[in-house]
């Protein structure tokens, strides 16, 4: 079962540079749709992948994109060839993304820092997240985008009536 | 479950996107409730929901196993 705060704590402790995107970012902005994984955008360099490796290696990682979920034995150096990594761990599913379409890599993201359980966590901004959800366009993403736009209205002003 | 007309009557409009969400059947009372929480509390709510769902699934699975 996924443990969101513990995963964030381990990522933060590793000094990995990451931005929370996807469903957890939407939750942090205030929507009420459940999600069962943690999506983070990372910098695609060897140092980042070494930190990813240090986080996931003790958590019995499995390749989440393979039907029988084989154990992931890739070394830190081998991970450095990945663009994205979808991994099931003892603490739940984490997707490490090299970029977030249509926005691009981590440096292209509009980011807000929020405090989560005492940690400063970088989260994809509301406008950027709306763009991502509108771009992906699965039914659930469109519903999330609808909720995010409503939240944007609520954040902008007091009630109209 | 509340219907859009009830939502429209019960909650003020914050703008066109808010109104559109109401018309699409989004329960905006939950959005307002979430917005009153801190980000940590919002994540805790999600964790509780995920945990409860997993417990429910496990209970159903155990029940089905006992019936077989």
Image (spheres, coloured by chain):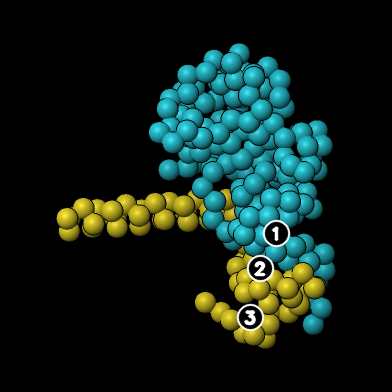
Chain colours: A cyan, B yellow
Give me the chain letter of mark 1. Answer: A
The answer to which image quadrant residue A82 occupies is top right
Task: Name the side, left or right, on which A74 lies relative to B10.
Answer: left
Q: Which residue is mark 3?
A: B4
Number of the front mark, 2 or 1: 1
> Where A35 falls versus A105 (above or below)?
below
Question: Residue at 47% of width from left, 23% of height from top?
Answer: A72
Whether residue A138 can be seen here: yes
Q: Position of residue A47 (x, y in %)?
A: 68, 17
Tell me if mark 2 has few (under 14), some (14-19) or many (20+) residues whose alpha carbon lies within 10 angstroms of its own: some
Dot 1, crowdedness within 10 Å: few (<14), some or many (≥20)? Answer: many
How far apart are labels 1 and 3 at the CA level?
18 Å
| CB atoms of marks 2 and 1 within 8 Å | no
Position in image of residue A92 (x %, y %): 48, 38
* Disc number for residue B32: 2
Return the residue at label 1: A145
> What's the residue at 69%, 71% (across, down)?
B21
Residue A26 or residue B40, whichever sits in front? A26
Between A17 and A158, the one nearer to me in the picture: A17
C-alpha separation, residue under disc 2 versus residue under disc 1? 16 Å
Quadrant position of residue B67: bottom left
Looking at the figure, which quarter contains the N terminus of chain A?
top left
């Amino acid at each position: 079962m996924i443990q969101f705060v513990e995963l964030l704590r381990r990522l933060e402790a590793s000094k990995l540079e990451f931005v929370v995107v996807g469903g957890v970012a939407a939750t942090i902005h205030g929507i009420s749709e459940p999600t069962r994984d943690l999506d983070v955008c990372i910098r695609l360099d060897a140092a980042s992948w070494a930190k990813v490796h240090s986080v996931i290696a003790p958590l019995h990682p499995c390749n989440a994109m393979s039907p029988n979920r084989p154990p992931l034995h890739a070394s830190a150096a081998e991970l450095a060839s990945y663009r994205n990594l979808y991994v099931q761990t003892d603490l739940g599913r984490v997707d490490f993304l090299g970029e977030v379409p249509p926005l691009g890599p981590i440096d292209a993201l509009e980011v807000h820092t929020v405090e989560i359980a005492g940690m400063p966590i970088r989260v994809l901004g509301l406008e950027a997240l709306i763009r991502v959800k509108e771009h992906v366009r699965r039914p659930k993403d469109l519903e999330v985008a609808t909720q995010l736009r409503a939240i944007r209205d609520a954040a902008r002003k007091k009630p109209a009536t | 479950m509340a219907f859009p007309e009830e939502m429209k009557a019960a909650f003020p409009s914050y703008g066109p996107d808010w109104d559109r969400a109401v018309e699409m059947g989004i329960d905006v009372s939950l959005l307002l409730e979430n917005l009153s929480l801190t980000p940590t509390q919002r994540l805790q709510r999600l964790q509780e929901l995920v945990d409860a769902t997993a417990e429910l699934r496990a209970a159903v699975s155990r029940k089905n196993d006992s019936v077989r």
